[in-house]
Amino acid sequence: MNLDEQLLELIVCPACRQALAVDEAHDELVCTGCGLAYPVRNDIPVLLVDEARKPD
């Protein structure tokens, strides 16, 4: 996964507006607030709540 550091500083969870952390093992961005995991496809974050994986 190759994401721009400046982009990661700007984007937030669309559900709760908290910061996102990179999960390289699963190619996801995980919300530090609500825990939703957003997929990253072809180095592009898919920040749609409908596409997010719910926390276990």
Image (spheres, rainbow, N blue to C red):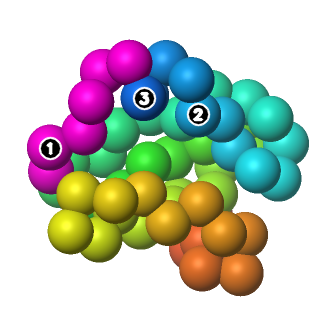
Q: Earlier in the sequence, mark 1 or mark 2?
A: 1
Rounded to the nearest angstrom, the CA distance separating label 3 from label 1 is: 11 Å
Count of residue discs: 3
- The picture quadrant where one finds residue 7 is top left
Residue displayed at 14% across by 43% down: 2
* Figure quadrant of the C terminus: bottom right
Where's residue 24, x and y in %? 20, 47
Q: Is residue 12 left or right of residue 37?
A: right
Q: Which mark is residue 26?
A: none
Q: Which mark is residue 7?
A: 3
Rounded to the nearest angstrom, the CA distance separating label 1 from label 2 is: 15 Å
Q: Which residue has dot 1 on it? A: 2
Secondary structure beneath disc 1?
A: loop
Q: Residues within 10 Å of mark 1 (few under 14, many from 20)?
A: few
Q: Which mark is residue 11?
A: 2
Residue displayed at 25% across by 39% down: 3
Q: Which residues are magenta?
A: 1-6
Secondary structure beneath disc 2?
A: loop
Kindly indicate whether the residue at mark 1 contacts the one at mark 3 (C-beta within 8 angstroms): no
Q: Earlier in the sequence, mark 3 or mark 1?
A: 1
Q: Is residue 13 visible?
A: yes
**Amino acid type of the residue that numbered disc 2 sits on in the rendered structure:** Ile
